[in-house]
Image: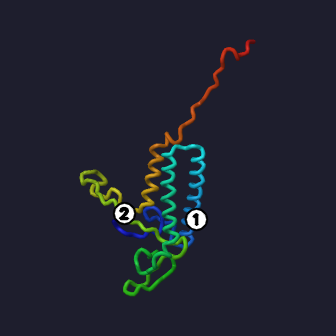
Amino acid sequence: MEYIENQGMAFGTTFGSEMWHKLALSIFRIVAITLICIYWVRQARKGARMEFLVAVGLILAGATGNLIDSMFYDFAFAFDPCIHFNYLEGSGIEHDCGLWGVQEVRHTGFLLGNVVDMFKFDVNWPQWMPWVGGEQVFPAIWNLADASITVGVIMVFFRQRKYFPKKKDVTPVVSEETQEVP
């Protein structure tokens, strides 16, 4: 386990360092969660396979977990501007951290908090493998919500033919009795 605070989305990627970038990410999360909820309810009413509803439910649960973490993080934990998780170059908010000097820190408040990540798959590829030998198999640090989203997406990806069967072309059968004779 390795504790980090993620300011952005998957694997620490962000839209940028200004406050509106973080707000845009939070608003995107809210819209995505709303659309996934609507989709899930419609699929349940249509009688979709339970396995599919579970997969979409995992994606929904993970997205909601990350949103809740981002929404309330700054209210649950005291903000320390001198901890490196709170540094954000380009934010324009400077704070004097004594020995470490002046640091630019992230914005704080509702919808602006970090998401805590703590799991790390610490396994390396064998040395003899070309290109990846000795490298970490999966270097990202993640949380349970990320795992939930990933498992849901993988379930949908590998079972998509079961979840979304193609409709067969039905050609009308014309019997001899219904054919007109000239």
Residue beneath the point at 58% across and 65% down: 27
- The percent position of residue 139, horizontal first and vertical second, equals 35, 61
- The percent position of residue 49, horizontal first and vertical second, equals 52, 43
Tell me: 157 left or right of 42.
left
Residue beneath the point at 48% across and 50% down: 55
Question: Is the residue 156 above or below the residue 14 in the image?
Answer: above
Question: Is the residue 99 above or below the residue 1 in the image?
Answer: below
Q: In this orientation, does residue 181 appear? A: yes
User: Which amino acid, by three-letter code, is at mark 1?
Assistant: Ile
User: Which amino acid, by three-letter code, is at mark 2?
Assistant: Phe
Describe the element under mark 2 as helix, strand or loop. Answer: strand
- The percent position of residue 36, horizontal first and vertical second, equals 56, 54
Q: In this orientation, does residue 89 appear? A: no
Residue beneath the point at 57% across and 43% down: 47
Residue beneath the point at 49% across and 63% down: 65
Q: Which mark is residue 81?
A: none
**10 Å neighbourhood of mark 2: few (<14), some, or many (≥20)?**
some
Q: In the figure, residue 135 lies in which quadrant?
A: bottom left
Question: 6 or 15: nearer the eye?
Answer: 6
Outermost right residue: 182
Tell me: 163 left or right of 170.
left
Describe the element under mark 1 as helix, strand or loop. Answer: helix
- Which quarter shows the N terminus? bottom left
Q: Which mark is residue 119?
A: 2
Q: Which mark is residue 27?
A: 1
Cα distance in 3D space between marks 1 and 2? 26 Å
- Which quarter shows the C terminus? top right
